[in-house]
Amino acid sequence: VHLSRGTLRVYPGPLDATATAPGSTLQRLVLAWYRERACQVFAHRLAVLRRDPRIAALGRPGTLGVRRMRRRWGSCFRDGRITLNIELLAEPLPLVDYVIVHELCHLREHNHSPRFYRLMDEVMPDWRTRREALRRSTTAGFLAGP
Ligand SMILES: [Zn+2]
């Protein structure tokens, strides 16, 4: 297994027993690669989304972090940090965009008030369709294993 420049190469060959054990080198490498890839993709989508002046006007997140989350796709802290669930990487980009825009709206409205949803309607009129698709997703939790 070789990790460089965002590419993970897994060479065919006999796996030793530790390779399938939890916390194994292989598992950590795959996760590290996945995290790096997620950071790149999410940061790129954020940049693309912010080309829309209405979205740019929501504000710029302090940092855009990535981590594994069990029950949510993203979160926005009051200090402006946004964290996205690493597992979003497996979702289609329109759904990734939906979560990013949802969290960006929290920069302005730190709640799910009617004002928050009005903001969502303004910047992403079809957000409900995307939310539905995300709710039907079977991807959540796949990195956590059985
Ligand atoms: Zn929210």
Image: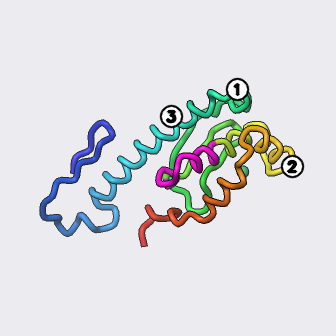
Let me know if residue 104 is in the magenta part.
no
Q: Is mark 1 within 8 Å of ligand 1?
A: no
Residue 114's disc number: 2
Residue name at image x 87 percent, y 49 percent: 114
Q: Residue at x 62, y 43 (%)?
A: 100
The secondary element bearing badge 1 is classed as helix
Picture quarter containing residue 137?
A: bottom right
**How far apart are the alpha carbons under marks 2 and 1?**
22 Å
The three-letter code of the residue at mark 2 reads: Pro
Q: Residue furthest bottom?
A: 146
Neighbour tally class for label 1: few under 14, some 14-19, many 20 plus, Cα within 10 Å: few
Q: Residue furthest right?
A: 114
Q: Amino acid at mark 3?
A: His
Q: Is mark 3 within 8 Å of ligand 1?
A: no
Residue type highlighted by circle 1? Pro
Q: Report if residue 99 lies within the magenta region.
A: yes
Asked if labels 2 and 3 touch by Cβ distance under 8 angstroms, the answer is no
Label 3 Cα neighbours within 10 Å, binned few <14 / some 14-19 / many ≥20? few
Helix, strand or loop for the magenta stretch, by majority = helix
- 118 left or right of 125? right
Q: Earlier in the sequence, mark 3 or mark 2?
A: 3
Which residue occupies 67% across, 60% down? 132
Q: Which residues are magenta?
A: 87-100
Q: In this figure, which residue is indicated by the disc labeled 3? A: 44
The residue beneath circle 1 is: 53
Residue 55, horizontal then vertical, whole percent: 70, 32
- Marks 3 and 2 sit apart, C-alpha to C-alpha, by 29 Å
